[in-house]
């Protein structure tokens, strides 16, 4: 056996030893996985998409804007609510945005004006994931989905979202 072959075997044994140590070492490291708990409507109340429709919300003479109404009926008062919204167009493309609310009241309707987003013919899907913080039980996840069919013509302008109560 040549010196080169001996070095190759020694190197191979070293690599096997290191891989073995890493595998056994990683098995002894505790891991924690945390997920927000998903609740039913009766646990904390509800946040739901009560309506979505199109119209000319920005006054540009094109009915290419989407109005989304979120109804808050909560039995708790979270310190913060993060609302992740996805609008999926009929083609499969879409828009995503985040609305953060601090000091949420128990009952309210949040208006979301999505300007220049109704640009295709067909069924639109709105998906909402709301995370509630400061409820004493960790994060709480509430989800909802809504579908509607906007008009056939689109107007000019960049997509924009306005949120207000």
Image (cartoon, helix red, strand yellow):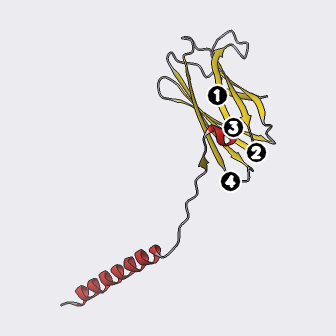
Tag count in the figure? 4
Residue at 47 percent of width and 24 percent of height: 91
Q: Which residue is mark 2?
A: 78
Q: Which residue is mark 4?
A: 138
Residue toward you, 78 or 159:
78
Would you say 2 lies left or right of 16 here?
A: left
Which of the two labelled residues, at mark 2 and mark 1, occupies the earlier sequence position?
1
Tags 2 and 4 touching, CB below 8 Å: no
Is residue 87 depicted above or below 140 in this figure? above
Which badge, 3 or 4, is on the more N-terminal residue? 3
Question: Where does label 1 land, which residue?
Answer: 49
Q: Which mark is residue 45?
A: 3
Along the horizontal axis of the image, is 6 left or right of 86?
Answer: left
Specify the quadrant of the image occupied by residue 56.
top right
Q: Are marks 2 and 3 in contact (CB under 8 Å)?
A: no
Closest to the camera, between mark 2 and mark 3, is 3
């Amino acid at each position: 056996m040549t010196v080169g072959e001996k070095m190759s075997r020694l190197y191979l044994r070293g690599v096997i030893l290191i891989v073995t140590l890493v595998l056994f070492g990683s098995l002894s490291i505790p891991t924690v996985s945390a997920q927000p708990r998903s609740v039913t409507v009766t646990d904390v109340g509800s946040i739901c998409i009560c309506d979505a429709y199109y119209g000319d919300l920005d006054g540009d003479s094109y009915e290419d804007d989407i109005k989304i109404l979120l109804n808050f009926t909560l039995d708790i008062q979270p310190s913060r609510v993060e609302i992740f919204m996805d609008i999926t167009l009929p083609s499969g493309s879409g828009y995503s945005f985040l609305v953060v609310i601090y000091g949420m009241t128990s009952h309210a309707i949040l208006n979301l004006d999505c300007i220049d987003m109704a640009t295709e013919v067909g069924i639109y899907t709105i998906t909402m994931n709301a995370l509630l913080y400061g409820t004493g039980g960790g994060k709480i996840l509430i989800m909802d989905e809504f579908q509607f069919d906007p008009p056939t013509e689109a107007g000019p302008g960049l997509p924009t979202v306005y949120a207000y109560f």
